Image (cartoon, rainbow, N blue to C red):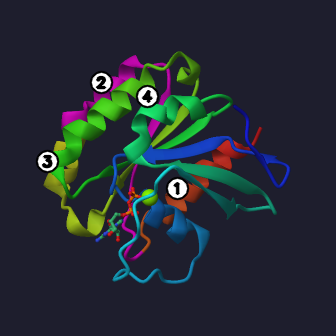
Amino acid sequence: MQYSYVHQKIACICVGAPGSGKTLLLRKLLSSTEVDETTSSIPTIGTSIFKLKLKNNKSVMIREIGGLIAPLWQHYYQSISNIIFVVDASNLCQISASGILLYSLLTEPELQNANILLVLSKMDMSYRQMRNEALLILQIDKLIKELPQKIKVVEFNAINGNGADKILSWLEEKDSP
Ligand SMILES: Nc1nc2c(ncn2[C@@H]2O[C@H](COP(=O)(O)OP(=O)(O)O)[C@@H](O)[C@H]2O)c(=O)[nH]1
Ligand SMILES: [Mg+2]
């Protein structure tokens, strides 16, 4: 399934458990203006598309796919080379659920050559020990060593936008042919 929008192909998807922070992350990347943190966002049912401006007049289309339709994610994998996987670093109770979603995504035959950006979100509500714990539970070091995909980890705080520059640089790097 190839989706075309304004003559541009979607090459990146943003996935993660419900409430992990995907919509707020993409909204924050979309606009450098402050996002009102008191507005609670509505869980994404289905998918939404974000067009982000990159350097050199380039742009990238990113499809957010809600965690509530995780069983349907696989229908959106075709021609996807970059995946942003969001994990809520402030909620370790949900981390194993995220792990299951991440592992099943990483074993998809269509995604063996994909670049994965693992975003630890809500870093304003997390702390170093929790972040380390999250990476340990997900066994990220092992995944990086043993899997064919290139996996990069970044931390993100939607309240002050810390980490947005790293995510944009990753998108710029992966977008260039
Ligand atoms: N404190 C804090 N809250 C966040 C952050 N990112 C998301 N949230 C909140 O977490 C909830 C779920 O976020 P949302 O982006 O809708 O998650 P999605 O279901 O993955 O799209 C919302 O109430 C957001 O305001 C963050 O970095 N810090
Ligand atoms: Mg959402």
Residue at 19 percent of width and 35 percent of height = 137
Name the N-terminal-most of marks 4 and 3: 3
Label 3, label 2: how far apart the Cα atoms are: 21 Å
Q: On the rendering, which quadrant does ligand 1 occupy? A: bottom left
Residue 153 visible, this angle: no
Residue 132 in picture, x, y percent from top left: 20, 46
Kind of residue at disc 4:
Leu
Label 4: few (<14), some (14–19) or many (≥20) C-alpha neighbours in 10 Å: many
The secondary element bearing badge 3 is classed as helix
Q: Report the residue marked by disc 1.
A: 167
Task: Work out whether residue 175 or residue 19 is closer to the camera in this orientation and state it.
Answer: 19
Name the N-terminal-most of marks 2 and 4: 4
In magenta stretch: residue 147 = yes
Kind of residue at disc 2:
Lys
- Marks 3 and 1: in contact by CB < 8 Å? no
Residue 111 visible, this angle: yes
The N terminus sits in image quarter: top right
Quarter where residue 54 is shown: bottom right
Label 4, label 3: how far apart the Cα atoms are: 20 Å
Name the N-terminal-most of marks 3 and 2: 3
- Marks 4 and 1: in contact by CB < 8 Å? no
Residue at 50 percent of width and 25 percent of height = 149
Look at the image and give the residue range highlighted in magenta: 137-160
Label 2, label 1: how far apart the Cα atoms are: 22 Å
- Marks 4 and 2: in contact by CB < 8 Å? no
- Marks 2 and 3: in contact by CB < 8 Å? no
Identify whether 111 is placed above or below 55. Answer: above
Q: Report the residue marked by disc 3.
A: 93
Q: Report the residue marked by disc 4.
A: 105
Kind of residue at disc 1:
Ile
The secondary element bearing badge 1 is classed as helix
Name the N-terminal-most of marks 1 and 4: 4
